Amino acid sequence: MLLHVAKQSLLSRKKTALLTFLSLLISMLVLFCVEHIRLQAKSSFNRTISGTDLIVGAPSGQLNLLLYSVFRMGSPTNNIKYESYNTLTNSSLVKWAIPISLGDSHKGFRVLGTNDVYFQHYRYGDQRLLTFSSGQKFETLFDTVIGSDVAKKLGYKIGDEVVISHGIGHTSFKNHDKSPFVISGILAPTGTPVDKTVHVSLQAIDAIHMAPAQLQKLVNNPASYSAEPQSITAMMLGLNNKFSTFKLQRDINNYDKDRLMAVLPGVAMTELWGMMSYVENVLRVIAALVLISALFGLSTMLLASINERLSEIAVFRVLGAGPFKIMSLIFLEALLLTFVALLSALFLVSLGLATMKDWLATQFGLFLSPNIFSFEVFQLAGLVLLATIFTALVPSFEVYKSALHSQLSNKR
Amino acid sequence: MDQFRDPTFQLTKERGFRLSVPAVEVIDLHHKYDSSKRSAGAIAVPHWQVTKGEHVFLHGESGSGKSTLLNLLSGVLSPKSGQVRILNQDLTTLSNRQRDAFRAQHIGVVFQSFNLIPYLSVWKNIQLATHLAKKYTTSTKEKAKQLLLSLKLDTQLLDKPVNQLSIGQQQRVAIVRALINEPELLLVDEPTSALDASAKDAFMKVLLDLSKRRNITMVFVSHDKSLMHYFDTATEVSSLIKSREAA
């Protein structure tokens, strides 16, 4: 009964109720979007790399190593010997080892030198392997495999010839224009930095740093090149047995023939995310402030309506409704409005994500799940209702007071 | 003045049939508003009573304290001292909550205007009254229809929103709403001032007819002396109230 009265009361003040509803809806949309994107960003961040047990590079900070090897950001400090790669590949503990050679770029995209192991064992997300949307992996020395973003941004297709430059700027004085790389494969979108990477073979990385005359000779006869590279930047290891991870890490850190450092990706990722957590907190605070201002709007609407409802309150008193009952009516109105706004916001966010999922993935590489009903979101919804109860206290108490002093009066 | 009864005379007359309990009895009532919020001041009623089934016309100009008296009778206000006995129940001994419940179940009230919640339908207004009095049953709707018919209203009005009704219709629905819980006492405050002359007469006739048939005690408050001839008893508010001083 009281619910029906609250509903009709809101409907009778359509304009103010609608505007309040909209401000609540918008603020909750922001809140839930931020929360959902935050959660998804965290999981998308954590899905950048999976299945790798150790990352090995030259000694520096573990964050630095993680950033340049996994996220392809920043610059590697030093290289490690290719011999170390061979040693670890042959180790009985190691199942597979992916070599990584960084330091060059192509039109702003990082170039990564590697070998076939990369395409066989590099995993992201839920242990997913890389797949080709077209073409295949390296066949000859100058074959190039590009990520989906590179292909889209630069409009490359299989068979296109590209120029790899030394250094990581957009253009460089030392353009390696004598090295005609040919695109042999394009990877399917992954939502990870792989999409923004140009992959070439390790030998090709060495080749582009050769003297021009030497390089010319090689270009004319690619098959003649067989030498192993001198050094690589880092490597990723997959182990036969997870339990040997710490032993191997210690062994690598104490390896005396090369200066190496091994880090656990999970530990480094957690440290990195910890540094980014203040950004997410800023986002949450902003969303919370928007919601609070909307709730104040709700409170203001109810408060402003009290004066025009004094006669209505008198009628309720006459019918035997106590001040508390009249107060709970106002309370119910606030909760009803918030609850409907809450459900609409959840519905709209779900609907928006479901329809824009593909667009977000292709345009921004944002892989958002349309399923927003996580524990955190329910927690947040509970908090919203709790906040509503608090802000509705002000108008409710005001109504309580006027109901207490309300009289059967026909002087209006 | 001669048409008004002297309260002392009324008292002696009432003593004649002491067998029945008076529907309304006010004893040594003193009331004064707390602060300067309202300017009505203080009122004091030494003794006043209304016999069961009696229809009393209470005449008073605005500011004579009649609104305060109605508030005290209905239990919305609690007096500073004295007794307000309704149906042999002293309202002053009840808690706020009990007084609210008592009012819902035993007292019907009709105002000058704004008797109904404007955004609810006629039926929901009636239902709300029974809900708050905890008297809602499945037969309530049938009862409401009967009342509407006896007030010469179309039963189809039930589903209409209140704000689509004419003032005359609204006042009649207010009677339905006031009577739906079968109250023993009806407090009516200037119910006809928003009505034109012909509607006024029709309204008064159905109101008195209904309450007579149902043996409901009625206290009718108005400043309009032309309505006095509908009643068997008329009392001047100023004769009840002993002394009034500004707060």
Image (cartoon, coloured by chain):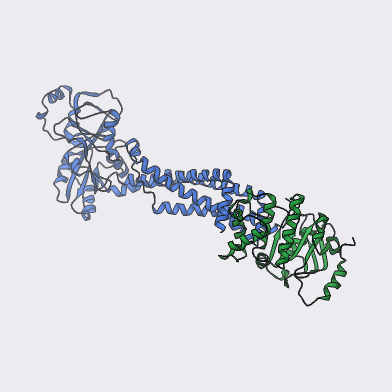
Q: Is residue B224 above or below residue A13?
A: below
The quadrant in which residue B143 appears is: bottom right
x%, y% of residue A140? 13, 31
Side (left or right) of A28 relative to A162: right
x%, y% of residue A2? 57, 58
Chain in blue in the render: A
Camera sees residue A200: yes
Query: Looking at this rendering, what residue extends furthest in the left direction?
Result: A224
Residue depicted at x 69% and y 70%: B94
Chain in green in the render: B
Given residues B141 and A276, the one toward you in this image is: B141
Query: Looking at this rendering, what residue extends furthest in the right direction?
Result: B2
Residue depicted at x 73% and y 66%: B212
Residue depicted at x 82% and y 55%: B226
Residue depicted at x 23% and y 29%: A157
Given residues B197 and A199, the one toward you in this image is: B197
